[in-house]
Each structure stands twice: as C-alpha cells, then as structure tokens.
Amino acid sequence: MEATVPEPSSAAGSATASSAPRSLAEALRARDDASLAALLHARPDLLGPVPGDMTQLATRAGTRASVVRALDRLDRFALQTAEALAVAPDPCPYPVLESLLAGEHGSTGEDNGARAELPRALATLRDQALVWGDDERLRLVRTARELLAPSAGRPSPTGLGPTVAEATAGMSPTRVQEIVAAAGLPATHDPVSAVTALTGLFADPERMSALLDEAPAEAHQVLGRLVWGPPYGEVTPNPTAPVRWLRDHGLLLPASARTVVLPREVALHLRGGLAHRVTEPVAPAVPADREHRPQLVDANAAGQALAALSTVEELVKSWEHTGPPVLRAGGLSVRDLKRTAATLDVTEATAAFWIELAYAAGLLASDGEADERYAPTPAFDDWLELLPAEQWSALAAAWLPATRTAGLVGDQDSKGRTLSVLGPELDRSAAPEVRRRVLELLAALPEGGSAAPDPLLARLAWERPVRGTSGLRARLAQWTLTEAEVLGVTGRGALAAHGRALLEHRDPAPLLAPLLPEPVDHVLLQADLTAVAPGPLRRALGDVLAVLADVESKGGATVYRFTPGSVRRSLDSGRTASDLHAFLAEHSITPVPQPLAYLIDDVARRHGHLRVGAASSYVRCDDDGMLNEILADKRSAGLGLRRLAPTVLAAQAEPGALLDGLRAMGYAPAAESRTGDVLVARADAHRTPARSAPVPVPDGPPVPDSTLLGAAVRAIRAGDLAATAVRKEPVAASAVPGELPRTSPAETLATVQAAALTGSAVWIGYVNADGAASQRVIDPVRVEGGFVTGYDHTADEVRTYALHRITGVAELAEEHL
C-alpha cells in the first residue's frame, strides 16, 4: 500500500493510521525518485551493490555499520533529535518529541529555537532513512534506537536511565507491590498492571509533584545529583534515610546488589520534560574576528605562495643527489627530519608539512632500489617547467584533498610506535572534509574577514559532534588554519581570491599570477663578497648562482655569499675562472667588486695544482716541494700517503676521502680521470622511476554521480515492481512469496510468445551464467532461436535472455500493467 511521507510540521500530522506506512520499506516505496536519489547520495554505502528492491534497501539501511555511519554525519541538533526519539515512546507523536526537545508549552524556560528548528532536524533524519512514519507515529530505525537508548553498560547521551518497566523487569512481584503501596496506589493482581500504575503515577505531573512534596529535603539533593546523569548511584547495605525513602517509593530502583538507578519517567519530570540539559538547535555563528582590505589579503597570500614555491624547490633539490634512506618500517628517520628542517631553516613540524606536501604532489618518492632512498620523481622536472602560479596551483590542488596528515608526526600509534614523516600510518580520511569545511567557513565571511579559532572550532564541533572523532577533527581544523597560511591559501587569516577559486574548483593560477613578481635576470654584487637577488631569479641564473655561492638569508630579497669553497665547487663543475668572471659581469647591474674577482682568481690559480686519481688513489703534483709539505703535515697521517715518485704520492684512502682530506688541510686539489684530464665533479641528479602521486584514502564509499544515482533508482524501482507485482494466477501451488516463479519450458515459451504478440509485460525469474538469480519485469518484443528479446524494466534497456535460463513466468494483473 503506497502512501506519501508527510513533511514534519509544528503540530501533529493529519495522516490517518490507515494511510501511514507500516514499515521502512513502505516509507521508502512512497518516496519520489528525487528523494530516493538524495538518500543514496547521502548514504552511498547503500549502493554496494545496488539493492534489488525496496525491501533490500530498507534492510541495508538498518544494518549497524550503515546506521553508525549515518549517525556520525548528523549535526548536533539532528543527533539530539534522534537521541530524544530513542528515549521516547515507540512510536512517538510529534508533540511528545517537541516537548522532549523544547519543553512543554507555557513552561518558564526560554525557547532557544528548538521548536522552530525541529522540522528541519526531523526532515534530515527522514531523508537519511533513520526515521520513518507520519507525525502521529514517528519511528526511529530499530538499530539506531539500540545504539542511542540507555542501558546498564552504555549510558544514553541524554543522561537518562531505563524506564520503570525496564528497571523492574527482574524484580519480584512482592517487591513491586510494596513499591505501589508505598506510593499510595491501590494493590493490583499482577506485576504488569502494578508497573503500569507506577509508570502512570510518575508520568502524571500533578501526582508526581504531590509525591515529591512528601520527600525529605535530603532526598531532593540525591535526586539532583542523578537527574542529568549518569542516573546510577551506589548504595550501602544500610542506606541513609533519604535514599531509603526514595527506594521504598520507587523513585530509585535497584539495578544491582549495590547500585540503584533513577527511572526515566522520574528524571523527565524533574527535568521539566527535557531530554537534554542543553539543547543546541542553532549552529554557532562564526563572525569575522578582523577585517582587512582584500587587496592586502591577496598580496600577503601571494608572498606566502612565492615562499612556498621556493621552499618546496629547495627541499626537493636537496634530496636529488643523496636523498635520505627509507626506514625499514617506512618513512623518514627523526635525524633526517631534523637535518631537512635545518636545511630549510624551519621547525621540524613545518618541515614535515613541506615534505608531505611534496610527496602528495608527486614530486618526491622512494626510488625502490636495494638501498632504498627518497628522491625527486620525473614529475619534479615537469613541475619546474611550469609558471610559478601554475606550480602553486599544482601544490594547492594536492593539498586540499590529501588524507596524509603531517600534524600527526611525533604522535604514537595504537602500538606505541612513533609516527614518522612519509610513514604508512599518517592517512586520516576525515582530513579533506575538515580542510574544505574550514575554508568554506572562511569563504562565508565578508571578503578580507578572518575568524578566531574558537568560534570556528565550535561550529565544526556542532556540525559533527561524534565523540570518538571530535578531538581529531579539532586538531585537523587547527592544522588547516596553519597550513593554509604558510601555503598562501589565506593571508592574515582571511581567504585570498586565489584560495576562493581553489575552493570553488576553479583554476587559481590566473588570479595568483598578477600578484607574483616577475623573475629577474640580475643580481647586485657587493664588496663584502655577497650578492643580493632583488626578487625570484630566472631558473638558469638561479641554478648557476646556487653552485657559485651559498644562500645566506632568504626573504623578499635573497642574499648569497661567495666563499672559497663555493667558488671551488663551481670550478669542480667544469667552469673556468674566465667563465665565472663573464657570468658575473653579465648578470650584475653593479660592477664586479675587486675582492670577489681576487677570490675567484686565487681559488682558480690553486685549483687543479694537485691531481688526485684512483690507485686506491694518488696525488700528482709538478711541485715536489708541495708534496714534501703534505707529507710533513701531521694532518695527512690518516690518509696513508707515501711517495712513489718525485711528483707522485700514493694513498690508502679512496679518491673522495683523499680530496676531502687535502681540502681540509687548505689545499685545492682537483680530481683526475684515467687519462689524466681534470674530472668534472658535477653529480648527476638522481630521479626515481616514474611514480604517481599517493591516492587519498576515501572516507567510505565514493559519492555517486547523478548518472549512477539515476540508474540505481530505476533499478530499485524495477526490482521492486518485479518483487511486488500481482500475478494473474498462482505460479505453483507451492510457490512462496519472494521466490522465483516456476513454470515448465512449454508454459514459459507460450506465455512470452503471447506477451510479445499482445505487447504486455510479464514477470520472470532468471538465473544468469554465474548462477545469480533475479526477478525481472520485461516487455517481450521478439521470441526466436531460444531467446526472448524485450525491454527490461529493471535494467531500463532492451536485453536478450536465454529461454532455458528462465525459471518461470507469470502475467501481471491488469491494474499493474
């Protein structure tokens, strides 16, 4: 019997009991396609696989895992509404639910908006298929009631205890009669009527008030400690007089040998009928804490974005020659994290964020070698070729949906192991949702407005109040605010224009590009052996200068310092002194200072005077006096040197160690090849094999698109039609509702041929090649060659079925054609 599920109203609905749905399946059957699609969109776990009919959908919607997931996604007031239904009579009229959440009409308590917001909360529960029935008979799904109702081992979130009937279930009939008599009620002939009478007393405000007026003053204090929960209290074998009076009158009922409980009816009376101490029907506001000029916000965010690009590039390039090793359990060691933080000149927490961001963007990965190390991926080279705004867009697009959470680094897992950067335990499926929601709340403020953290966290806690995850969600929100600022999504705490574009699935690069400075092709050389880059350098200039000088300070202008070691490093890479002079003269808008020219010439004059090759290793020099000086130096003892010829020293150390040792002694040796030529010491940048960026860990099944939702709704409708269609004649005397029809092959062929001639629909049972059985309603159009072709209402398309796989067939009743 089909019926329309009424929308909630401020008064009880007008639907009659005869038209009300009698089950969740009937309530779902009464929905229109849009409402059914909304349910499947909100609870995508119901689609795995697509239910065969409404009964299957209702059954799946009532499973524990699915209900828990649906409850976890309710806002605070919708959850409080479900909690109130769990302690209300089943079924519950709308006025009763309203009084549990807003109090009785005319009460002295101030209405906080619960009455006005209750229709919305109830509509949410109905849309989620957690509540069904009309306003006269509201029913919470049984599994949800079991999860939210109070029990001895699991207190209710409302703080209420069991009902009188539940608390007296194991009590002796004599004791029940004693309580009835002490309460001033007439004796009954059976425990059931006695419990009913006691429940009626506690539910009657006037009689209950009169009974409490007789209680000792201390008894009211005892009730006050239990009324808002937990409702259980311990008692001694010889309780005090107030507790004994409450126990004798049934206001406290025994829960165990040493525990008493406050019955739900008594607590509700003392609370004024409210299920919750504090009802929160309205979401906390997130006001603008400060307001800045939007142009200033965008400029600050652009500056942070530029710094982010520089930091990520420096990080990845620092790992391209000798990246840190991968721990046996996966991830980066604490020592390597500290070393990286020192390289980037940031805290370890900030370094962990940049490492995880580069990994999420696919710029870093493990190389997969036997001595496994982290290194840049080929995608890093492609990223370097992008324009700065496009580089930032790639980083931000990887950050927003990432489930890896750098803020967890340093915490411990369930086994007491410390979580490491790039380790396997950093994924948190709630991170993308929280990250996006924080940005959405910032986007709702006036342009240039920033929010204080406390109101924002309060709003998030109201939207997802589940106790088991609220602490993590608060931490995720705080990390989001910090990460968005350092990445340049926000500026001064306010969402920038390019951050808003990112949130709205638009390309932020066109908005960010005009805010970023153009790369410069010059530096300012100074007499103190430094060079100042007045902005971001063009890539070719920056690459050469990074070898020729060391970075001394960063900021709006980067300061480079020239040292003998940095000049030697450039000479080792194959450049000559004349190359360096020409390079500096070309790219400096100030004359090359004389001290810098002298430094280059001095290092170049000594560079390569000594030659080191592989024997184990050797030193070759045309000046035998210099070789004598080296042999006489005590610092050379560890190199294992001995003279082979007037101009050659042999060494036990490897060539690399010999080079480092001589340089530490103040010499400037050059490496030599097997042919005697100077060996260019430019290290090849290491790259991993092609690697894809890590895929975010989904928070449950993916949300279906409109195409899938439409197909699923049609399939469920068609399957429901096949399962509930009325047949003209019984298929067989032994047929059982829900089983496949059974007819002989001759009857099957005759029926489908007749349906093809008359253009009517038939109901068939079908077993496919995999042995899966199903019921379908089809309109046959052609029957030949052992196959029947027709329009399948379940699949919403024309299909062909083998006749020998049809278990049976029946015509539909006229009213169902």
Image (cartoon, rainbow, N blue to C red):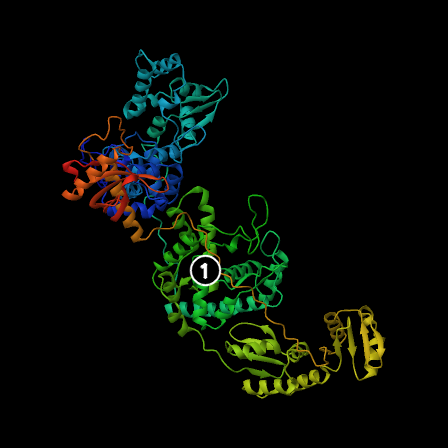
Q: How many marks?
A: 1
| Vertical position of residue 472 compared to residue 238: above or below | below
Q: Position of residue 229 (x, y in %)?
A: 42, 32
In which quadrant will I find the N terminus? top left
Residue closer to the observer: 114 or 537: 537
Left or right of 655 in this view: 318: left
Left or right of 604 in this view: 294: left
Near mark 1 (Cα within 10 A), the count class, few <14, some 14-19 or many ≥20, is many
Left or right of 324 in this view: 74: left
Snapshot quadrant of residue 214: top left
Q: Which type of secondary structure does the marked residue at label 1 adopt?
A: helix
| Vertical position of residue 351 compared to residue 656: above or below | above
In which quadrant will I find the C terminus? top left
Which amino acid type is marked by label 1?
Answer: Trp
Q: Position of residue 203 (x, y in %)?
A: 30, 25
Q: Which residue is mark 1?
A: 399
- Residue pushed farthest front? 785
Is residue 192 shown to the viewer in this render?
Answer: yes
| Vertical position of residue 315 compared to residue 558: above or below | above
Residue closer to the observer: 507 or 759: 759
Q: Position of residue 707 (x, y in %)?
A: 29, 53
Q: Position of residue 333 (x, y in %)?
A: 62, 56
Snapshot quadrant of residue 679: bottom right
Is residue 134 shown to the viewer in this render?
Answer: no
Left or right of 309 in this view: 126: left
| Vertical position of residue 252 compared to residue 560: above or below | above
